[in-house]
Image: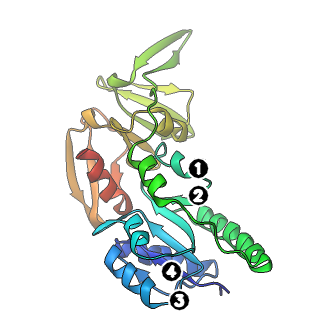
Amino acid sequence: MNTFKAIIIEDEKPAARRLHRMLVEIGVEPEVMLHSVQESVEYLLNNEAPDLIFLDIQLSDGLSFEIFDQVDIHSAIIFTTAYDEYALQAFKLNSIDYLLKPIDQEELEKAVDQFRLRFRESENNNNKAATINFEDIAKLLGNPIERNYKKRYTAKVGEHLKLFHTDDVKLFYSENKGTYLHLENGRNYLIDSKLESLVEELDPEQFYRVSRQAIVNINAIDDMISYTNSRIQIKINSFKEMDLIVSRERVKDFKSWLER
């Protein structure tokens, strides 16, 4: 098991338990799971600071950054978040570790391995973890740099090249290693892009990645239905290729996106 002290701060208890199980599988035994700003402040004031914190940004009673307004902590932090890919550039620009929900086991292991390496180096050099400027990160997440999102995509149809405006695209989806756009008339067109690239190119106010296979246009949603295991099924009447299911881990963020 780990030679360092780790804790989880995550308001969704099922997500916290899932992360705990994933960490145990790679030899990390978190000492505690905390679920709110208040609970985290009380714990950190009355216990020895952990070496590593897995920290969700949005907690039930506020942003997790508020914890550090009340407690002076120099722990290493790996953020666990459902923020969209573009907002996460705030982390990339500041060399801060993060894991995008739903958390992938391989990505988790990679992040922990990187921490272990830095932890050993800091122990040898008697250095503390670098202090994070939470105020700056919060500003970057809340007010990302203005940018122009992609408005048009092309698809090859026989010998012809067709042009499509994103406003006319109901959703993008991946199937059999290809990426397609879907139109209101029910037609699908193969495009030369990966879903991961589309997430960064499309306006996050209009498009949301509901699963690993699909990105939907908010204006194309015809119905939303409660589904098993606290998930949500999205209905786009013209689309029959696959079920569009928002996973339990994404539901909270999906609802926030709908209400922006």
Q: Amino acid at mark 1?
A: Lys
Viewer-side label of 1, 3: 3
Q: Marks 1/3: CA distance?
A: 29 Å
Q: Secondary structure at mark 3?
A: loop
x, y percentage for residue 9? 43, 74
Q: Earlier in the sequence, mark 2 or mark 3?
A: 3
What residue is disc 4 on? 7
Residue tagged 2: 96
Question: Which residue matches tag 3?
Answer: 48
The answer to whether marks 1 and 3 mark residues whose Cβ atoms lie closer than 8 Å is no
Please tell me which of labels 2 and 4 falls first in the chain.
4
Vertically, is 109 above or below 180? below
Mark 1 touches mark 4? (CB < 8 Å):
no
The reply to whether callout 1 and callout 2 are in contact (CB within 8 Å) is yes
**Sequence-first disc among 3 and 4:** 4
| Residue at the spot of label 1 | 92
Identify the residue at horizontal 20%, vertical 38% (top origin): 222
